[in-house]
Amino acid sequence: MRRRWTDELIESELLKCIETLQLKRMPTGNELKLIGRNDLHLKISRTKKYRGWAEHLGLPLKASCTLDGQLCEDYVEKLLIEKGHTVERMSTKYPYDLLVNGTVKIDVKMAAPYILRGSRVHAFGISKESPTCDIYICLAYDEFGELERLLIIPSHFLKIKTLCIGRTSKYNEYLDKWEYIDQYTSFYNSVIGFD
């Protein structure tokens, strides 16, 4: 007999798995699969997703690069909304993170500093020489997790796999270039006939 999944059943099964795994946080998909609960993993993925269920249950997520990336996307989304833009979050399978004003595709990147050949740098994983977004928003954090620089760079200028910048960089000309989003929005609207 097939199980009828409800929110209550998902919550109940999740709590059992958390107890089995002896966690004080939301389990990951891999952890659920390790204990034979791919069925639950699929239901979580198709409903509130891991982040939504963690919030619903009041549990923290496991610290990860994905979580850090999502927090950066949250931050950029908030800034864009404060500047009067509409923002749609894309799923992790999309080649970009945010769709702004229904037209502008933005990929959010983050980096912490490290020392490379004696110089302090930030390295952003662009990962593709042919961009799949219109604009990259790169968040450079300092050693204490505070935002040091925010760069808004049209993807046309980043046909590279890794953006590595020091304190002085030609890319500093893109510091806080929020006007690019308005310019891209105006361009797209003129092409598709919106005012």
Image (tube, rainbow, N blue to C red):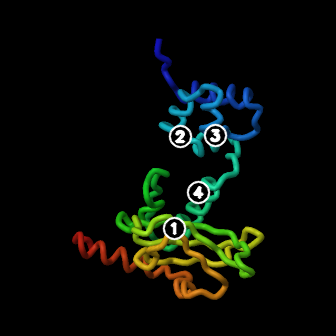
Residue at 50%, 18% in the rendered image: 3
Which of disc 4 and disc 3 is earlier in sequence? 3
Amino acid on which the number 3 mark rests in the picture? Thr
The furthest residue to the left: 193
- Which residue is at a point 48% across and 37% down the rendered structure image? 46
Q: Write down the residue under mark 4.
A: 70
Report, in whole angstroms, how far the alpha carbon at label 3 lies from the one at label 4.
15 Å
Name which residue type carries label 4. Gln
Please name which of the two marks, 1 or 3, marks the residue nearer to the observer: 1
Whether pointer 4 and pointer 2 mark residues with C-beta atoms closer than 8 Å, the reply is: no
Q: CA distance from mark 4 to mark 1?
A: 16 Å
Label 1 environment density (alpha carbons within 10 Å; few <14, some 14–19, many ≥20): many
Residue 114 in picture, x, y percent from top left: 72, 72
Residue at 69%, 46% (x, y): give it: 62
- Which is in the foreground here, disc 3 or disc 4? 3
Task: Between label 4 and label 2, give the one nearer the viewer.
Answer: 4
Tag 2: residue type? Lys
Please tell me how crowded label 4 is: few (under 14), some (14-19), or many (20+) other residues with Cα within 10 Å. some
- The disc, 1 or 3, on the residue closer to the chain's N-terminal end is 3
**Is mark 3 in CB contact (under 8 Å) with mark 4?**
no
Residue 45, x across and y down, in percent: 51, 38
Residue that label 1 marks:
126
- Of mark 4 and mark 1, the one earlier in the sequence is 4
Count the marks: 4
Element class at badge 4: helix
Residue at the disc numbered 2: 48
Q: Quadrant of the C terminus?
A: bottom left
Q: Residue at x 59, y 76 (%)?
A: 164
Q: Which residue is mark 3?
A: 28
Name the image quarter holding residue 139.
bottom right
